[in-house]
Image (cartoon, rainbow, N blue to C red):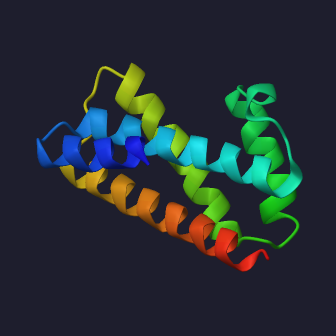
Amino acid sequence: MAAAASAHALLARGDANGATSRAYYAMFNAARSVLWLSDEIDPAAIKKHASVFRLFSERFVKSGRLSAEIGQLLTKAAEARFIADYDEIDVSLSSAQRNIEAMDQFLQALGAWKENRG
């Protein structure tokens, strides 16, 4: 996943804002991907962030396919991305590291779901 690799690379270079933003987009696009894989929802039909959050919550968290904790990771990543992209205050490197760890956990959970969905 290119956005995840970019997030790690940006963090290694000390770009906390960039790493946080790319981590969010890796998670956002992964959520869109599993909606397509699970329910055949065309990613082109769900470009809006709110639509992805709503459908992901309904079809994965509330249905019990994934834990509430995994759903919260996506919500928190969106909040962090907003700060990274729009706030006048920069994200700290320690916060960016936590955002990357959350991204890795989220992507791992979705990967496990894909492997076990058969």
Please identify the residue farthest to the front as the structure is shown.
118
Q: Position of residue 54 (x, y in %)?
A: 81, 43
Number of numbered discs present? 0
Q: Position of residue 32 (x, y in %)?
A: 69, 43
Residue 31 left/right relative to 54: left
User: Image point 77% across, 74% down: which residue?
Assistant: 117
Please say if 54 is above or below 102: above
In the rendered view of the protein, which quadrant contains the C terminus? Answer: bottom right
User: Image point 44% across, 35% down: which residue?
Assistant: 81
Please say if 5 is above or below 52: below
Q: Position of residue 84 (x, y in %)?
A: 36, 31
User: Image point 78% across, 64% down: which residue?
Assistant: 61
Res. 89 image quadrant: top left
Residue 81 left/right relative to 45: left
User: Image point 27% across, 56% down: which residue?
Assistant: 97
Please say if 106 is above or below 52: below
| Most foreground residue, 52 or 83 | 52
Q: Position of residue 46 (x, y in %)?
A: 77, 30
Please say if 92 is above or below 65: above
